[in-house]
Each structure stands twice: as structure tokens, then as C-alpha cells.
Image: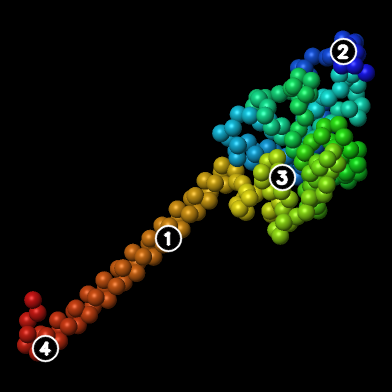
């Protein structure tokens, strides 16, 4: 087929489709448990705080991704538990509408497993994220059993990620590790530092300040003890001098 005929055919198809408005509300079912809700909120807060100086990404969770102009209530509505889109405007949205976002799909998707969703997350959704979304990094995590598995897209196929010595999985798109800490899925830097929430950073700084104060107090106590020992030695020496008939200066 010549380029002109292909362009004409594509134009005819585009003209025949009535794209719905991009201002479409998300249509997601309730979350499975408090653990799922808390985990999603944690991931969103962490990545937004870590990239607080950036304006070129969108991170959210439990939000519908509309990628079919047909708008049928079917498997074409995929609402990942957590996803990040890079090179996107940082603003609030009612949903992610692909044809209103320059055709962009998520760069990273994390699904939280449950008894009712695990088979879909590991099967149908994985295929959609691989073949349709072409999402480079896909992970799933079970907040109950702590099962964590990840995949990176290589030549159009998901390749399973090999955990680090700490059991973490590297996300090339985020340039962060994903790992489990105290039963929660967290982000870690390439040098092993855990990405913290602002209140965690404040608490850590407060703890460090308290430790420094304790060290300073210990040093002061030691200095006072040394001064007291010197005073006592001086007093003993003065008593000996007086006993010898010598008045100390």
C-alpha cells in the first residue's frame, strides 16, 4: 500500500470515529481492604514527595485509564492500583484519557494483589499492559503475603526482574528500587536509602538532633566530672600543703 493510500485510509478511519470528550470521570470499584488503600496512598505520597521539584510527571492510583474511543464498559477500562506517566503535565485529573494525553500510556504500573484480582492482574492485565499499553515497568505486590514480582519490557515482551541481594526490584523508569519494609511496599534509591515521607524525614531529623543533644550532654557531663576530679585533687593537695605548714596560693 502506498503512503498516500495508507494516509487516506487512516484519515477515513479517524473521521468515522466519534471520540468522546476527554473530561470523563474515573469508574473504579471500591478497594479490597484498608491495606490496599493505605498502600496506594503511601506510594502516591512517596513518589510525589521524592519528585516534588518536578512538574513533568503524573502519579495516581485506582484511577480509570480510558484507551478505547468506543467507551464500552468492558475490559477496555483498566484502572491500575498505582501508575506513573512521565513527560506529562502535573495536574489533577478525573481519569487518564489516552487520546487526550498525546497517546501516552503509563511508564510504570503497580497492581496490588487480592484473592479476587490476582488471576486478572497476573494474566489479562499483564497482557494488556504488555501488548496494548507497552508499559515498560510492571509490578505486582500482595499487601498480605508480601509477594513482590516485577517485569521490564524487552523487545515487546515482559522479562521478569531479578531481585537484588536485599530482595528489591529495580525500576528503570523511576530509577528507584521497589522493596518491602515493615510490610509495606517502599521505594529505595540506587545506594540503598529508603525514600521517606516528609513527616518521616522530620522525625529522622528530630531523632538525629536528639542524639546530637544526648552526645553533647554526655560530653558536658564528662567534662564536669573531670573538672570535679581536678577540683578534688587540688583540694587534697592544698590540705597536704597546709599540713606541712605551707599555705597554698
Helix or strand or loop: what does disc 1 sit on?
Answer: helix
Tell which circle, 3 or 1, labels the residue nearer the N-terminal end: 3
Instruction: Tell me the residue that label 2 is attached to.
Output: 4
**What is the quadrant of residue 248 in the picture?**
bottom left
Tell which circle, 4 or 3, labels the residue nearer the N-terminal end: 3
Tell which circle, 2 or 1, labels the residue nearer the N-terminal end: 2
Spatial CA distance of label 4 from label 3 is 81 Å
Tell which circle, 3 or 2, labels the residue nearer the N-terminal end: 2
Instruction: Tell me the residue that label 3 is attached to.
Output: 171
Spatial CA distance of label 3 from label 2 is 41 Å
| Mark 3 crowd level (few <14, some 14–19, many ≥20, 10 Å Cα) | many
| Of labels 2 and 1, the one closer to you | 2
Instruction: Tell me the residue that label 4 is attached to.
Output: 243
What's the residue at 53%, 49% (across, down)?
Answer: 203
**What is the quadrant of residue 124 in the picture?**
top right
Spatial CA distance of label 3 from label 1 is 40 Å
**What is the quadrant of residue 18 in the picture?**
top right
| Of labels 3 and 2, the one closer to you | 2
Q: Quadrant of the C terminus?
A: bottom left
3 to the left or right of 214: right
Q: Are marks 2 and 1 in contact (CB under 8 Å)?
A: no
| Mark 2 crowd level (few <14, some 14–19, many ≥20, 10 Å Cα) | few
Amino acid at each position: 500500500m502506498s503512503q498516500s493510500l495508507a494516509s487516506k485510509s487512516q484519515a477515513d478511519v479517524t473521521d468515522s470515529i466519534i471520540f468522546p470528550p476527554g473530561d470523563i470521570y474515573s469508574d473504579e470499584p471500591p478497594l479490597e481492604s484498608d491495606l490496599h488503600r493505605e498502600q496506594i496512598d503511601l506510594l502516591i505520597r512517596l513518589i510525589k514527595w521524592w519528585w516534588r521539584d518536578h512538574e513533568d510527571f503524573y502519579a495516581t492510583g485506582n484511577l480509570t485509564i480510558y484507551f478505547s474511543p468506543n467507551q464500552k464498559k468492558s475490559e477496555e477500562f483498566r484502572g491500575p492500583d498505582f501508575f506513573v506517566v512521565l513527560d506529562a503535565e502535573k495536574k489533577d485529573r478525573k481519569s487518564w484519557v489516552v487520546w487526550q494525553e498525546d497517546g501516552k500510556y503509563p511508564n510504570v504500573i503497580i497492581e496490588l494483589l487480592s484473592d479476587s484480582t490476582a488471576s486478572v492482574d497476573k494474566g489479562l492485565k499483564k497482557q494488556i499492559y504488555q501488548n496494548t499499553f507497552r508499559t515498560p515497568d510492571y509490578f505486582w505486590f500482595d499487601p498480605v503475603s508480601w509477594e513482590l514480582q516485577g517485569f521490564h519490557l524487552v523487545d515487546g515482551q515482559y522479562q521478569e526482574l531479578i531481585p537484588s541481594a536485599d530482595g528489591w526490584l529495580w525500576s528503570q523508569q523511576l530509577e528507584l528500587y521497589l522493596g518491602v519494609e515493615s510490610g509495606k511496599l517502599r521505594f529505595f534509591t540506587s545506594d540503598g536509602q529508603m525514600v521517606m515521607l516528609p513527616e518521616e524525614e522530620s522525625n529522622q531529623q528530630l531523632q538525629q538532633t536528639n542524639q546530637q543533644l544526648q552526645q553533647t550532654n554526655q560530653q558536658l557531663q564528662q567534662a564536669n566530672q573531670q573538672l570535679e576530679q581536678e577540683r578534688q585533687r587540688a583540694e587534697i593537695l592544698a590540705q597536704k600543703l597546709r599540713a606541712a605548714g605551707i599555705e597554698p596560693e
